[in-house]
Image (spheres, helix red, strand yellow):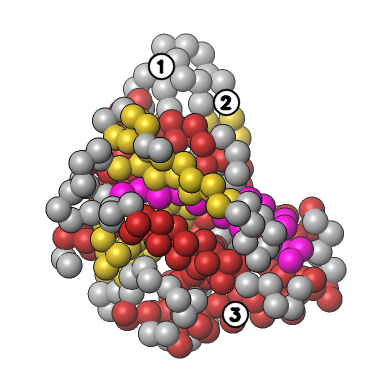
């Protein structure tokens, strides 16, 4: 049942167990009245809204920066619980121990079920589907892009996890032993190969990463983009930290890569002081700082969220 949610309405729908044995949910936010043209945007983040936790994370300022401009423009914004509740340790464990584990396939199954339900509700345009993948949410988005049943032509990635092999969770989960390296590397190579085999020129890909992101590894994210552009796997790239932030725009018309400065290693999240990643709060200094670590250069400027949404809207406008 739809309930009011600010100037929008939202609804949460729970589905029975899928082949992974998990019960999962869909939530969408949209204008009350159907727009004449209503693109569908799936948003995969690291917050509870994609992890089977508190769906009120939709009030998180960083999440709102992703969906509010899109919903205001007439898009139907959708969240689903990601496989294994977006637990990267679980993804690593499944990949290492289950030869047939298919993160992209499980994601595709849930997306297709969600799309069918949205169609039953008489909402959304299925010929205009986009995905935003933030941090860990980027990996299922990319693997979905490589899946034969992928219906999305537009994918925007923010500080993306592109490869399980480089994550610290590998050691935390006890899979740092050399015998697991070929399995994890092959899983990454396989999905990239599938993306290339399916001719990414049919799709549009936008990516933004910090110039010194040691959490997801800037080299991996940039290397993925360059590899796709070069129609081969990862090309040699400069070692990081990259000293001069740079921007690569619209190579071959189907991929757009932005490299922004990683934020300082410590920044304030005191609401009275303002959010330093929000340009509207940059000068708000009403109280003393309460520093919070920016883990391994992973955070980038708040404006990147807005750029991702603007890019998606520009793609829909060209349909």
Tell me if I can see residue 245 in this picture: no
In-image side of 279 versus 263 (left or right): left
Left/right of residue 191 with respect to residue 174 in the rendered view: left
First-in-chain label (1 vs 2): 1
- The residue mark sitting in front, 3 or 1, is 3
- What's the residue at 80%, 56% (across, down)? 173
- Do tag 1 and tag 2 residues touch (Cβ < 8 Å)? no
- Horizontal side, residue 100 vs residue 213: left or right: right
Specify the label residue 285 is tagged with.
1
User: Residue 58's x, y, as percent?
Assistant: 44, 36
Report if the CB atoms under discs 3 and 2 are less than 8 Å apart. Answer: no
Q: Is disc 3 placed on a helix, strand or loop? A: helix
Magenta span contains residue 196: no
How far is the residue under mark 3 from the one under mark 1? 47 Å
Q: Which label is found at residue 189?
A: 3
Q: Quadrant of residue 244?
A: bottom left
Q: What is the number of the mark on residue 291?
A: 2
- State the extent of the magenta-drawn residues as a range: 76-94
Which of pointers 3 and 2 lies earlier in the amino acid sequence? Answer: 3
- Asked where in the image residue 209 lies, by quadrant, the reply is bottom left
Left or right placement of residue 256 versus residue 234 in this view? left
Image x and y of residue 126, in percent: 30, 65
Q: Is residue 148 visible?
A: yes
How far across and down, in percent of the image, does residue 194 sit?
Answer: 50, 83
Quarter of the image for the C terminus: give it.
bottom left
Q: CA distance from mark 3 to mark 2?
A: 38 Å
């Amino acid at each position: 049942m739809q309930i009011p949610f600010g100037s929008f309405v939202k609804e949460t729908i729970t589905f029975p167990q899928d082949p992974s044995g998990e019960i999962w949910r869909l939530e969408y936010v949209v204008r009350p009245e159907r727009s004449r043209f209503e693109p569908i945007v799936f948003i995969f983040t690291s917050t509870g809204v994609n992890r089977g936790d508190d769906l009120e994370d939709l009030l998180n300022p960083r999440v709102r920066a992703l969906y509010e401009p899109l919903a205001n423009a007439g898009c139907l914004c959708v969240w689903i619980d990601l496989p294994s509740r977006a637990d990267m340790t679980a993804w690593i464990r499944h990949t290492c121990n289950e030869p047939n584990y298919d993160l992209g396939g499980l994601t595709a199954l849930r997306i297709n079920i969600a799309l069918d339900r949205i169609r039953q509700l008489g909402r959304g345009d299925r010929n205009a589907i986009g995905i935003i993948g933030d941090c860990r949410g980027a990996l299922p988005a990319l693997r979905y892009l490589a899946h034969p049943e992928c219906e999305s032509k537009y994918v925007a990635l923010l500080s993306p996890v592109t490869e399980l092999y480089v994550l610290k969770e590998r050691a935390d989960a006890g899979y740092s032993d050399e015998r697991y390296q070929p399995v994890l590397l092959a899983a990454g190579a396989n999905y990239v190969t599938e993306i290339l085999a399916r001719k990414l020129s049919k799709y549009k890909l936008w990516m933004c990463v910090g110039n010194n992101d040691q959490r997801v590894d800037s080299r991996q994210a940039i290397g993925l983009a360059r590899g796709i552009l070069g129609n081969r796997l990862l090309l040699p790239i400069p070692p990081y930290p990259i000293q001069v932030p740079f921007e690569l725009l619209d190579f071959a018309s189907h991929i757009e890569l932005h490299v922004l400065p990683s934020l300082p290693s410590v920044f304030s999240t005191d609401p009275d002081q303002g959010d330093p990643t929000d340009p509207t709060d940059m000068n708000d200094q009403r109280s003393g700082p309460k520093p919070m670590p920016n883990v391994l250069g992973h955070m980038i400027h708040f404006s990147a969220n807005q750029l991702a949404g603007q890019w998606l809207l520009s793609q829909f406008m060209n349909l």
